[in-house]
Every structure is written in C-alpha cells, then in structure tokens.
Image (tube, grey):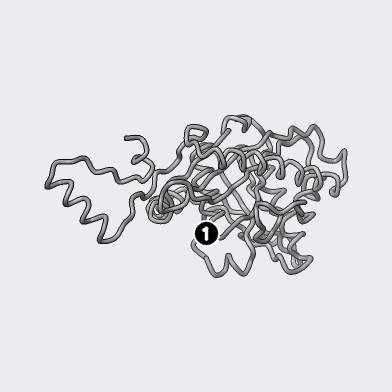
Amino acid sequence: MAQIKVNSTKTVEVLRSPSRRAIGLFSVYLRWYLRRHFHALRVANAGRIPPQAEPLILFGNHASWWDPLTAMLVAQSVLPEREHYAPMDATALEHYRIFKPMGFFPVDNNSARGAAQLLRAGSQVLARPGAALWITPESQFQDVRQRPIVFKPGLGALMTRMGRLTCVPVAIEYVFWNERLPEILVNIGEPLEIADGAMEDSRTWTNLLSYAMAATLDELAMLAMERDPASFATVLDGSSGIGGIYELWKRLTCAVTGRPYHHEHGSLHER
C-alpha cells in the first residue's frame, strides 16, 4: 500500500489497484503449478453470485496453504471482470512478496493493529466500483469438519460500517476421488443480501456468517461424497495417471500393440 501525507504528522495508507500484468503472468505459472499437484479444480453453484452486487464480499473457510492460490483461479473464472483484493498475514505477505502487486494487503493477525488494518483497507476496497473483497475470517487453518465454525470479529466489524452489501460464502475442500492426485472442490453458498450493515452489531454478523459457512461446507461435503464431476464446473484439468516408469511402460506397450491407453483410473470402470 502506498502512503500519502495529509499533514505534517499523519499519513494515510492508500490501497493500490492490482496489476493486471502481474496477475496475468502469475496465472500462467499458477495453472501449470496446480495441474502438477491436482487432478482438477471444480466449482459448484457459481451462478449464485449476483453479477451486479456492489459492494461484494466473498468469505471462505481456511482449509490449507493452497487456499489463496485456489481463490485466485476461482476469482478469475467466476468474476473475471472484477478487481479482487484479499488480506494476508503481514509476516506471510513479506515472505511471499510476489503477491503484493496482485491485490493482497498486509494484516497483522497477532495484534489489535490487524483489526484496524482490515477495517481501513477493507473499507477502501468496498468503496471501489467493480471490486471484490475475499477474506478468510477464521484467520488460521481449520479442518473442514470442525463445528462450530469460529470466525474472528474483523469482518463483522467491517460490515457494521457499510450500508447495502452482499456477502457470499465460499467453501473449499481437498479430496481424493478416483485418481492418484486430489481434487480441489469449491462450493459457492447462498448469498446474504444485506440492506444495511449498521442495523446489527459485529457479533451478530459474525455469528450469521459462521452459520452460512457451515451450511456451505455441509453442502460441499454431500457433493464430495457423491463423487460426481457433473455436479461441478471444471475450472482446471490437472494431471492424471499413475506417473513414473510404470506409466511410461504402459504407454509404450499400448503404442506398440495398438491398444488404447486409458490414463485415468476412473476410466477403467467405464470400459
């Protein structure tokens, strides 16, 4: 964030717009990277996001280290016309400096200063037409099965400063289906259309958001147990097959004998 001096003693931090060039270049690498580690990235119920919602907050669970990378590709897929912003722990953002020009802003999760940073930067994001704020209110890794879901109060406090706004829960889970590599499954929950954020206190909003997150995760769990890719839109196809020397040998023998090679394990049951 840039700083502008408004008088001799006070500076105001101004949030910079995400660099489209930086995002475009990183997305090429990101798609290659996720394809190496996952079989597919799949999104369910993307149509639930109101396309013209302003201001827009997307809040998610925090299941793993992969969440920011997953959210970046989901954002580009379901809301390509928006500018996307997200808080990141200040220490982590300093370590992964590559994210700084891509809409991530620092928040100190280990002090009261972090709440003020979120309120200040979040208010700037939500005041920008066409912007979307992504946030993980758990602020630390939590298992997707944990109940109740406990959110930090920062997002609820931010909501009390707003008028009309839309909050959409986004659930993420990483599961193994039929292939060697796992699936990234994402479920978009029912949007919360809020007429006036000031009409409730931050605790009420925090509790409401945690209930909505639990319902969205429960819905995703049912979709995951069904193991049906048709319930999702596939955003990214990744690696499949068993890999290594054995797969190379199978490919060669199939090529020599003229037999078709089925690289996906799931396809064996469809023959």
Of residues 79 and 3, the one drawn nearer to the viewer in this rendering: 79
Q: For the residue marked with disc 1, what is the amino acid?
A: Phe
Vertical position of residue 80 compared to residue 14: above or below? above
Of residues 43 and 21, the one drawn nearer to the viewer in this rendering: 43
Left or right, residue 252 beside residue 76: left
Which quadrant of the rendered structure holds the C terminus?
Answer: top left
Left or right, residue 236 beside residue 249: right
Residue 103 visible in the picture: yes
The quadrant where residue 169 appears: top right
* Residue shown at 67% from the left, 39% from the top: 168
Of residues 257 and 54, the one drawn nearer to the viewer in this rendering: 257
Image location (x, y in percent) of residue 267: 35, 39
Q: Which residue corresponds to mark 1?
A: 99
* Residue shown at 23% from the left, 56% from the top: 248
Left or right, residue 200 beside residue 29: right
Residue 27 visible in the picture: no
